Amino acid sequence: MPADQLHEHWDVYNRQLQRVGDQLRENPVTPGHYHLVVNAFLFNPAGQVLLQQRALNKLNFPGYWDTSSGGAVKAGETIEEAMHREMTEELGFDHPVTAADNYRIMPHSHWVSAWFAFQTDWTTRDFTIQTAELQRIRYFDFPTALDHLDQIGFDNCRLELRGAWEHLYGAQKTNAT
């Protein structure tokens, strides 16, 4: 059975991000409409980033390395509420999420991604992973994380990882990596 929840309800937005309706996840988004997605990168005190490896039963890109946490915004949720829910569900990481943690809004063909960055002193042993959606997590140094996110056919998230780093540590440190 796939890990993806096809019965979820999504709000649907127009190009100006005004809500225009809702739909089930299993239905394709009509042209000119969008659904919202959230993603986060979590960094430890050493500046390493936590990545998750997707479960083998995911419909799209099973086994690929991905952001620390992420997923679709459900109907009625704000991006902050959705980000908090996804981190809690996937990682057992019950951490407050504010608008200031959001560093980028990125439009795509039929979805809009909201990107978040966080710092934590949690080790991989402190997280409780949701094995239905991911098979493992691991901290990587910045260059190794970039390599793991460079995957054929899948959003490689390299630009977003650099944005998360800059959001937390400043542009001068990015140039050193």
Image: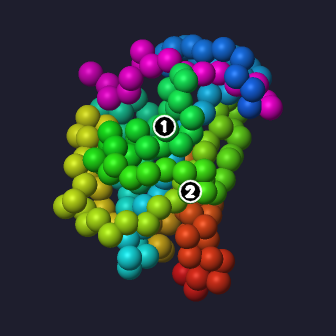
Q: Quadrant of the C terminus?
A: bottom right
- Rendered location of residue 4, percent (x, y): 38, 27
Residue identifier under label 1:
82
Q: Which residues are magenta?
A: 1-16
Between residue 127 and residue 25, name the one nearer to us: 127
Seen from the viewer's position, the closer of residues 31 and 103 is 103
Q: Residue at the spot x=39%, y=52% of the render?
A: 95
Answer above or below: position of 81 versus 175. above
Tell me where residue 5 sits by quadrant: top left
The vertical placement of 75 against 52, above or below, is above
Q: Is residue 166 among what the camera can see?
A: yes
Q: Look at the image and say whether residue 14 sits in the magenta stretch.
A: yes
Instruction: Report the predominant secondary structure element of the magenta stretch.
Output: loop
Horizontal arrangement in the rendering, residue 44 relative to residue 15 (left or right): left
State the residue position of label 2: 101
> 164 above or below 39?
below
Percent coordinates x, y for residue 119 in the rendering? 43, 66
Q: How many marks?
A: 2
- Residue 133 belongs to magenta span: no
The amino acid sitting under disc 1 is Ala
Answer left or right for 171 relative to 32: left
- Mark with earlier residue (1, 2): 1
Q: Position of residue 103 (x, y in %)?
A: 63, 57
Residue found at x 61% / y 71%: 166
Residue at the left extreme of this rendering: 125
User: Which amino acid is tagged 2?
Assistant: Asp
Secondary structure at badge 1 equals: helix
Q: Residue at x 22, y 59 (%)?
A: 126
State whether residue 138 is above or below residue 108. Answer: below
Question: In the rendered image, which quarter contains the N terminus?
Answer: top left
